[in-house]
Amino acid sequence: MEIPQLGPEQKRLLGALVELVGGETRLVGGTEIADAVDRNPGTIRNRMQSLSALRLVEGVPGPGGGYKPTAAAYRALDSERLDDPADVPVERDGRAVDGLTVEAIDLETVHSPTECRATATLTGLADQFSPGDRITIGPTPTVDLRVSGTVEAVDPAASTVTLDVRRMRTVTDAVAAD
């Protein structure tokens, strides 16, 4: 089966469901999902029907019912279940921001010597950031990359922040420069 392309709202809902399920095999109620993404439970029911039609979500009706992601959901989110996923921390003004980690960093304009932008997708609430905040993302688990810059835009629906990147370094580079 071909993996469908998802819109930002679909990714957000599916990502919230995956996060709420965690490593368990439990059903997650629509109200719990609605609370996690700050949406109306009726809207969640409608959206989950469309995700169910795409075979990304299985729904069980009734008082003890709820939703659970299918294996295709993990593929669609491009995140297979990991036994021990690494956290990629975020700092604001040199202090750790608790309760979130970075799922992806998309470097958009690295070819420009004066303008470099990155969009970070967060597992947690992006709306705790505002344009003008100075943040640092990382280090990442494999290459110890740290990306620092100023928040230009926040998209709570997609759980993303867009940065005007001021510096990218690996931890190894930082140690060698000291």
Image (cartoon, rainbow, N blue to C red):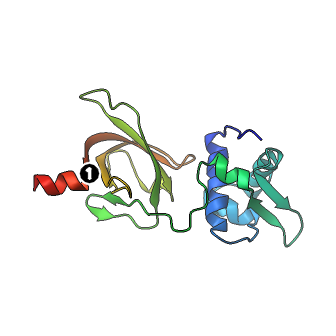
Quadrant for the N terminus in the image:
top right
Q: Residue at point 29% right, 26% down?
A: 112
Circle 1: residue type: Thr
Quadrant for the C terminus in the image:
bottom left
Residue 123: x percent and y percent?
51, 57
Q: Residue at point 68% right, 61% down?
A: 33
Q: Give the crowd class for mark 1: few <14, some 14-19, many >=20 residues within 10 Å.
A: some
Residue 168 in sight in this render: yes
Residue 170: x percent and y percent?
26, 51
Query: Would you place residue 105 above or below residue 25 in this image?
Result: above
Q: Nearer the viewer, residue 125 or 132?
A: 125
| Left or right, residue 33 beside residue 164 | right
Disc 1 secondary structure class = strand
Q: Residue at point 22% right, 55% down?
A: 172
Residue 135 in sight in this render: no
Query: Would you place residue 52 above or below residue 41 in this image?
Result: above
Residue 162: x percent and y percent?
41, 41
Quickly name the residue at label 1.
170
Residue 67: x percent and y percent?
77, 62
| Left or right, residue 169 beside residue 38 | left
